[in-house]
Amino acid sequence: MLGYRIIDGIAKIDESEASAIRAIFSGYISGMSLREAAEKAGKPMVHSMVKRVIRNICYIGDDFYPAIVSRQTFTKANAELIRRAEKHGGKKRLQLPPVYTEFEISEPEMHFDDPIKQAEYIYSLIGVRK
């Protein structure tokens, strides 16, 4: 994911990319279009890709990813997405993405000798607590 490197199974911030992520958020909040914000940050992308960056909840940090932007910055950028969509008569109503904080895991019923397949299987058992 843009802004991170996985080193020994741990997500670490890649500062050169993280500064571009911060610049994208800042540029968009300040009034630039999604594409303009990305281009000015040195990461030219299509509109939909920049929108995915702005809506990616991982950038405020979680148990795996360290935070690159503050929750306040994330909320402002996503509120701006919603405001602009409504202003331009967007047919789909955008909403702030949910922030999940509680998870549960089912009991494993299978075992794989391949550690990667076992890890993928175990991760697949994690779900959001309702």
Image (spheres, helix red, strand yellow):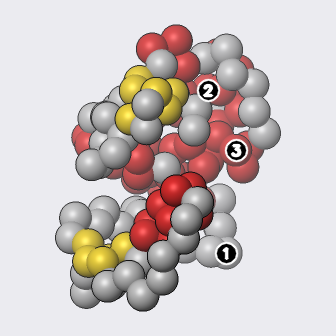
The image quadrant of residue 46 is top right
Q: Quadrant of the C terminus?
A: bottom left
Residue 50 or residue 37, whichever sits in front? 50
Q: Earlier in the sequence, mark 2 or mark 1?
A: 2
Amino acid identity at mark 2: Ala
Residue 32 image point, x, y percent: 59, 29
In the picture, residue 50 is in which quadrant? top right
Q: Which mark is residue 49?
A: 3
Relative depth, front residue between 64 and 95: 64
Q: Nearer the viewer, mark 2 or mark 3?
A: 3
Kind of residue indicated by mark 3: Met
Query: Could you tell me which residue is drawn at 52 percent across and 56 percent down?
Result: 115
- Residue 81 placement, left or right of 8: right
Question: Residue 117: horizontal and vertical position, in percent?
Answer: 58, 63
Quadrant of the rendered structure where residue 88 is? Answer: bottom right
- Residue 49: percent from left, percent from top: 70, 44
Q: Residues within 10 Å of mark 2 (few under 14, many from 20)?
A: many
